[in-house]
Amino acid sequence: MLKQARAFASLAGAAARFFAEPSQARAGVVRERLRSCRSAAFGAGAGGAGARPGGAGAGREDAIRVSRHLSEAAFQAAKAVEECLLFGVNAGRPMAAAVEPLRDAAKSLDDSVRTLRKGGKERCVDFLVSAKRQAQQAARAADAGAAEALEIPNTVESIKFRETFSRLSRAADEAHQAADRLGEMAAADND
């Protein structure tokens, strides 16, 4: 799970760079990072290295759930980039406002997994609270952007923007759920 959290943080950073300045090259970096996320997810889901932050065996089901949420968050963020490029959506400040807190949430999730793995449960909780707050901020910004897109007079353009914002909102929701599961794992380790 450690590799997967790191890969998701890397993908979210690449997505933030794409939305700040869209280009084919930056979209290619996001696609490459998605492949890394998938590879890391296979290792985590199969019980490979990093599947359990706090130790081997117990909590495997929770680790698999966290892995699924991280995978889905990465997929949704990558699809937002892909669709933005494919549909010719003008990625501007509203999209950057949604993806920047998602990037920060992914970084906090990565920090929390690393900290939990090292046994720092109290510090892990601090990172998780931060990840949840940032994921909520990303979801709110994406939802606000989707609502604004309803005001676009061109129906086709409106749909393009709403779909891209919808992907970012789902990525944020998945990151939030991953933080919830990691919190449950940290609490279980304290028992």
Image: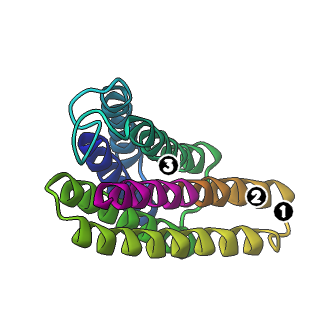
Estimate the spatial distance between the alpha carbons at disc 2 and disc 1, rounded to whole Å: 5 Å
Query: Would you say 73 lies left or right of 56 here?
Result: right
State whether residue 114 is above or below residue 39.
below
Q: Main secondary structure of the magenta part?
A: helix
Give the camera-side residue of 144 and 42: 42
The 10 Å Cα crowd at callout 3, few under 14, some 14 to 19, many 20 or more, is many
Query: Would you say 112 lies left or right of 23 here?
Result: left
Query: Would you say 128 lies left or right of 133 here?
Result: left
Mark number for residue 73? 3
Q: Which residues are magenta?
A: 172-191
Instruction: Identify which residue is drawn at 30% across, 55% down.
Output: 189
Instruction: Identify which residue is drawn at 46% across, 70% down.
Output: 132
- Between marks 3 and 2 in the image, the one whose residue lies nearer the viewer: 3
Mark number for residue 157? 2
Q: Position of residue 156 (x, y in %)?
A: 81, 53
Res. 29 visible in picture: yes
State whether residue 46 is above or below residue 146.
above
The residue under label 3 is which amino acid type?
Answer: Ala
Q: Which residue is mark 1?
A: 154
Estimate the spatial distance between the alpha carbons at disc 3 and disc 2, rounded to whole Å: 25 Å
